[in-house]
Amino acid sequence: MTENQAIAVKVNGQLKDLSSIYSLNGDEEVEIILPKDPEGLEILRHSVAHIMAHAVKMLFPEVQVTIGPAIEDGFYYDFDRDIPFTEEDLQKIEKKMHEIIKSRQPFIRKELSKEEAIDLFKSLGESYKIEIINEINDDKVSIYEEGDFIDLCRGPHIPHTGIVRAFKLLSVAGAYWRGDERNKMLQRIYGTAFPTKQELDEYLKFLEEVKKRDHRKLGKQLKLFEISDDIGPGLIIWLPNGAIVRKVIEDFWRDEHLKAGYQLLYTPHIAKLDLWRKSGHLDFYKENMFSPMEIDEIFYQLKPMNCPFHIQVYKSELRSYRELPLRFAELGTVYRYERSGVLHGLLRVRGFTQDDAHIFCSEEHLEDEIQKVLDFTVFMLSTFGFSSYEIYISTRPEKYVGNLENWDRATLALEQALKNRGLTYHIDPGEGVFYGPKIDIKIRDVLNRSWQCSTIQVDFNIPERFDITYRGKDGKEHRPIMIHRALMGSLERFMGVLIEHYAGAFPLWLAPVQIEVMSISEKHVEYATKIYNRLIKEDFRVKLNVDNEKIGYKIRQATLNKIPYMVIVGDKEVESRKITVRKRDGENFELLEFEKFIEFLYTDIKDKK
């Protein structure tokens, strides 16, 4: 297959099989779909998913097939099989797929009535397909035949199996039928496919790099965090190294917020259930909240958000227009129920700390405050090494509170702020929160992966629910507008992204241990200890290694622990009263004056690079 080989067509805007061109009357608008096109790549991958299902049925006839869509980086297919697929099974399936591909079997589309389709899949013993057919509203359904394999599918597909040139089965995971924990656990096989072998090889190389950077693996190796079954899934224990990194991040965050005119808050982890009823969370967010607890015959709720608490701080005294904008910030820990199947290290957890803030302002301040938050976000992200990002405006969802006029005003304010800053953005229809539209900023890491972290939300509605006001210049009561914002999102998720972005090799200012001082032999211990104490006095995070081990071993261990600098002390260093410095990348600075090293470290930390 070449990148210019047609694999499908778009007729009057609708994707169809390439064979459909033979039934056109000549009046239609036709667009050729190539494998290099986004739609073409999706069709290719969907077709390879069918080939995989065909191979599975040939090897394991007792297995029932369910659904097999294309996804962002490949495809998957879910199978009902009591015994999990093994790595050896995947190799057998791949081999059989190559045989199917070599046979160049055509994909043939047919339309059947629902009754005919049900009878067909009954005869094939495919109960999941029957369940899907019964939920289709149309009188007819389409199936695809590929060799002796038949599948329920809307299509389109590639003309024949021989078009496939580059694919790979990647992994197996459990998946509940339709994502519902009450349903049966299925076996999901993931794979990927590309138009060319070169593209596949590049992607597989990328996956290897992703594995090396997996924050769960590095978190264990570098002793940053732990998740314990004794405590519960999705709940993070910060180990000493991780706690140091988190402290550095939090200190920087608090200092910068104080400089930016924010006031810091601390609020409780629980509140009366009625508070969440008043805020609207019980109506719109209940499925993400833990069950209430009863204390002294009153029901309390673990907080899923910090905003109602910040509202209470606002209401704690009478407010005047002279105080606005009023900015409250908190590193507030919240708790949200996530299904066990989606929990993933630090990236998807049940308890996390948001770098949360709420700004109360008048309408005349709104646009300027949004712009200030945008500037603050860009500054914060760039400090941590993220300079590439995509911006989205998420608009009103189906379930929402408030009136349409306020939603339109809020959305317009977000758009105008982005335009004033010259920032390009996309519209994400219907993805706003129930109380207002939002700006979402998705950062890109060193591997060009996208991560949702920062958000800015404009809210006219919760101030109305809690009836908060301020006294205006005219002496009358007015309703403030509330901006919800998070720059990093959650510290847990942000930390996971940071670990993978830096592959665990944090820049000096973030590294849990910045310098390791190591002696070559016992006679160098005294000088090494003196250097260690001087570095401690200068407020660096330092480890002293005077163990009776070979220096090569000490260097290897420090390198594995990704410590930025190693100070090596031997005869030359003792005699010259200087130091030899080795960077974790292997670069050496021999016989350096201690003061020069300190000066270099201070510059490195100040630049945060």
Image: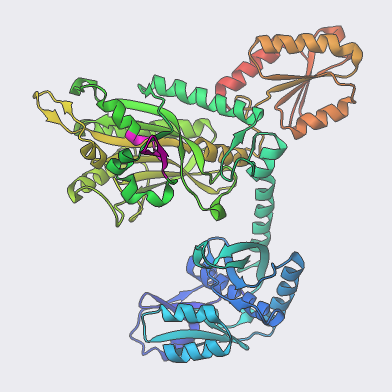
Q: Residue at x 64, y 41 (%)?
A: 228
Task: Pinpoint residue 15: horizontal percent, then vertical percent.
Answer: 43, 76
Residue drawn at 87 percent across, 7 percent down:
575
Instruction: Specify the quadrant of the image occupied by residue 243.
Output: top right
x and y percentages locating residue 75 in the rendered image = 57, 67
| Figure quadrant of the C terminus | top right
Residue located farthest toward the front when viewing the structure as drawn: 297
Q: Quadrant of residue 231?
A: top right
Q: Is residue 598 left or right of residue 545?
A: left
* As drawn, 132 above or below 253: below
Residue 22, quarter of the rendered image: bottom left
Residue 119 seen = yes
Instruction: Give 70 or 204, whichever is nearer the viewer.
Output: 70
Q: Position of residue 510 (x, y in %)?
A: 60, 27
Q: Magenta segment, which residues?
A: 292-308
The N terminus appears in which quarter of the rendering? bottom right
From the viewer's perspective, is residue 51 above or below residue 350?
A: below
Is 323 part of what is drawn in magenta? Answer: no
Q: Nearer the viewer, residue 543 or 339?
A: 339
Is residue 299 part of the magenta span, yes or no? yes
**Which residue shows up at 49% across the image and 78% down it?**
8
Front residue of this view, candidates 231 and 554: 231
**Percent x, y for residue 159?**
55, 82
Q: Is residue 108 visible?
A: no
